[in-house]
Image (spheres, rainbow, N blue to C red):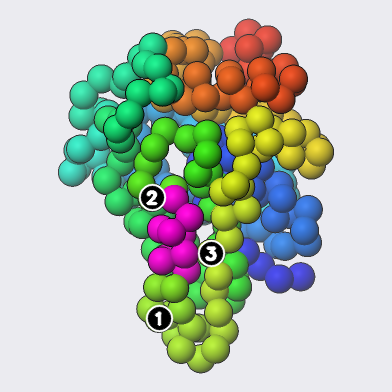
Amino acid sequence: MPSTVVLLSGGLDSATAAALARHEGWSVYALTVRYGQVHAGEVEAARRVAAAVGAVRHVELDVNLAAFGGSSLVGDGPIPKDRSLAEAGIPSTYVPARNTVLLALALGWAEVIGATRIVIGVNAIDYAGYPDCRPDYIAAFDYLAQLATRAGVEGREIRIWAPLQALTKAGIIRLGVELGLDHGLTTSCYEPLADGRPCRRCDSCHIRARGFEQAGVEDPLLRLPALS
């Protein structure tokens, strides 16, 4: 069975991408990075998802991007609330170079374990406007992966797979349902309440809510008393 490194945040997209990789017959090696995010509860969600998809191994790394600042997701300024999803511009929740850092870490691990694929759950339709979620960025890193590794030089390609790029959030949710993914294991909120419930006011909560509404599926997080 071929191996893949899956970047697993604990959110809807990465969980669906992990479930899809497993469904397609790949051995999943999950990588979660604690990068100083204020919504650190997503790490626990990643653990739940890794167990659910039968990850061979789940590695959690500490790379403190909060030391640089530059994003409200690492505590540099308030998390935007009640924003219109139609507002233009890159929001303050963008973490500078985050996906480049995460993919580089995944690339290193993939080369060590002989994985031939790295899975990232980025989406270029219903998303917050981050530049490192775009298809041309993924294509550029895929090219870099072949140049920057011994595996690539020796003809053992490590390809970047972003299977959700062209799906809406509703499409991602429907795919998760088809794969039997328990969406209640995931989290999306950038600033959960004290009891773990989603705030329902941040960009990510709004995108998630719209996705479930358009998919015609109930979000299990909204009927739970609290996240464990």
Tell me which residue sits at (27%, 46%) in the image: 96
Disc 3 secondary structure class: strand
Q: Residue at x 33, y 29 (%)?
A: 88
**What range of the chain is rendered magenta?**
134-142
Q: Residue placed farthest to the bottom in the image?
A: 154
* Residue wearing tag 1: 147
Q: Mark 2 and 1 residues: CB-CB less than 8 Å, in contact? A: no
Which residue is at the front of the view, 166 or 160?
A: 166
**Vertical placement of 136 versus 65: above or below?**
below
* Magenta segment, prevailing SS (helix, strand or loop): helix
Does the CB distance between marks 3 and 2 fall below 8 Å? no
Question: What is the three-letter code of the residue carrying label 3?
Answer: Ile
- Going from the N terminus, do you reach mark 3 or mark 2 first? 2
Q: How far separated are the C-alphas under marks 2 and 1? A: 19 Å
Horizontal side, residue 86 vs residue 195: left or right = left
Does residue 37 sit above or below 216 in this rendering?
Answer: below
Amino acid residing under circle 2 = Asp
Is residue 223 visible in the rendered image? The answer is yes
| Residue corresponding to mark 3 | 160
In the image, residue 110 lies at what x, y percent?
Answer: 53, 69
Could you tell me residue 201's position as x and y percent? 44, 13
Q: Quadrant of residue 85?
A: top left
Q: Which mark is residue 132?
A: 2
